[in-house]
Structure formats: C-alpha cells, structure tokens
Image (spheres, grey):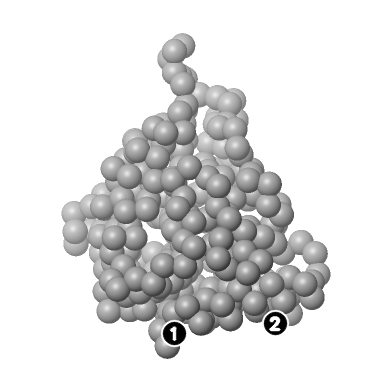
Amino acid sequence: MDSLIGRIHQAADYLREQIGDRQPVVGIILGSGLARLADSVKDPVVIPYKNIPGFPVSTATGHKGNFLAGEIAGKQVLMMQGRIHYYEGYPMDMVTLPTRVMVKIGIKYLLVSNAAGGVNYDYKTGDLMIIKDHICQLPNPLIGPNLDEFGPRFPDMTRPYDPGLISKAEAIAGEMGIPVHKGVYYGGTGPTYETPSEYKYIRIIGGDVTGMSTIPEVITARHSGVPVFGMSVVTNEAHDDYAEDYFNDGDDVVRAADAAADKMRAIFSKLIESL
C-alpha cells in the first residue's frame, strides 16, 4: 500500500509541475475512438503518460496515452486521451492509478466515456447511452488494503452515477435534439468480444451495453466521493442472432465511436459549462 500511495503522490506532483497554476475542476476519461473530444480543449498542455514517473502506458487501439490540461466551456479540465485496461495486463491498482492521481490533484467531477456493444435490441450502432448503473464482472479495484486517505473501507454504491448530472445531460441532449438512451453498462475483462450466448446472458441479467472498462475508474472515484457521469457510444449491435458471415472487428468499433464523437462532445461541453 505504501508504495502505491507513493506512486500516486509522485505522479500527482509531476502533473502539478506540468500544468502550473491551473486547477482542474473536471476529470475526463476518453474511450476507444473518442479522441476527437480532445479537440474541445483550449490551450492544452499535453503530458504523455510515458513521461509521468511510475505511470502505466496505454496500449489499446484508439488510445493516444496523454493527459491534456486545458479549458472546456470556461472550466479547467484534466482529460485522459486513452485509459488503462485490465486486459492489457496491468493490475487493478495501475488501471485506477490515473483516477487516483486526478482525485489527488483536486477534480470535483469525473466524466467517463467508452465504446460499447449494444446488447439491448433497441440500441443501434452510433446511439448514445447515458449510464445509470453498472454490472461489474471485473475485479473490484478496492480489493486489498484500504487507502484511508482516499475513502472508507466499504463505500456506498447505491448511486454510482450522479442523478443530478444525469438529469442535466438528459435535458441538454433534449435541447440539442440528440436522442439518448439511459441504461446499464456491463463490464467484463476482455480482451475477447463476448460470444453470442454471453450477449444473451448479459441482456437477461439486465445489461444494455457491454464493454471492457469504465467501472474500475467509477468505483475508484466514488470511493473518494467524486460525482461521476458516464456515457457509452454503441459501436456494434451485440446480439445473439448473427448472420453466418458476421465478424466483430476492433477497427470497426473505433470507426463507429469516432462517427458519434461529435454528438458526445456537444453534450459533454454543455454539461461541463453547467458545473
């Protein structure tokens, strides 16, 4: 535990040196294919993960591996261009290290995004879903000695995604004429996409979309009492009635997320402006 705390403090100190007197209010984590959201950041300071002491490096497709410190809609933000995944081989304390560092720097809100497969039959490729809850099939990142300076041993998860932020985002999407779903995110380890039977199982137990990320970061933020808003881009229809020649391709997922990024960027910008 002591070495993890030391790593968090060291990384946070380095980031503070790089961003100077900026005080980020909002932390943002971008998922696969959503790098275009970074275009919203004004006057960005770019800090590659590889330059941060003790920091993991993102290896996933569509994840650039940088922090951007700058301004969106008049608010100072700290944005992750790409996240760290459990399937990359990192332990959970490294997957969630960036979130711990953002909390240490003083963010007041965390906004998370991801690319996900739509197991709900009503969801189509390119749709947006506000995450209202999740089902976690990843290892819980709080297993092990509790980091007392960050939060309690047994944090409440009744409302992992902040109801106030959800209401604001729904209103913003409505005003902009952008259709959004509201549903449950199922998180598995990956890196394989699910089998048709697994998609059916996820749908039966209440999942609307499925992915390989997000939940560890959300749990870590909520451990410290930071309100979270999450949104998924549906990048493929994850059903169990595929055509015989169907193939689930990772490049297609990134392209579908990129195509929907402008709608998500518009909602995120207005949401940040309202904070």
Residue drawn 26% across the image and 52% down it? 262
Query: In the image, residue 227 lies at what x, y percent?
Result: 49, 72
Amino acid identity at mark 2: Glu
Q: Nearer the viewer, mark 2 or mark 1?
A: 1
Query: In the image, residue 230 lies at what x, y percent?
Result: 44, 59
> Residue 87's quadrant in the figure?
top right
Give the class, few, some or many, for how many residues have Cα within 10 Å of label 1's Cα (few <14, many ≥20). Answer: few
**Labelled disc at residue 20:** 1
> Residue 56's quadrant in the figure?
bottom right
> Residue 123's quadrant in the figure?
top left
In this view, the residue in front, 6 or 117, is: 6
Query: In the image, residue 192 lies at what x, y percent?
Result: 59, 33
Amino acid identity at mark 1: Gly
Marks 2 and 1: CB-CB under 8 Å?
Answer: no
**Is 77 placed above or below 56 here?**
below
Q: Is residue 182 visible?
A: no
In this view, the residue in front, 194 or 70, is: 70
Q: Secondary structure at mark 1?
A: loop
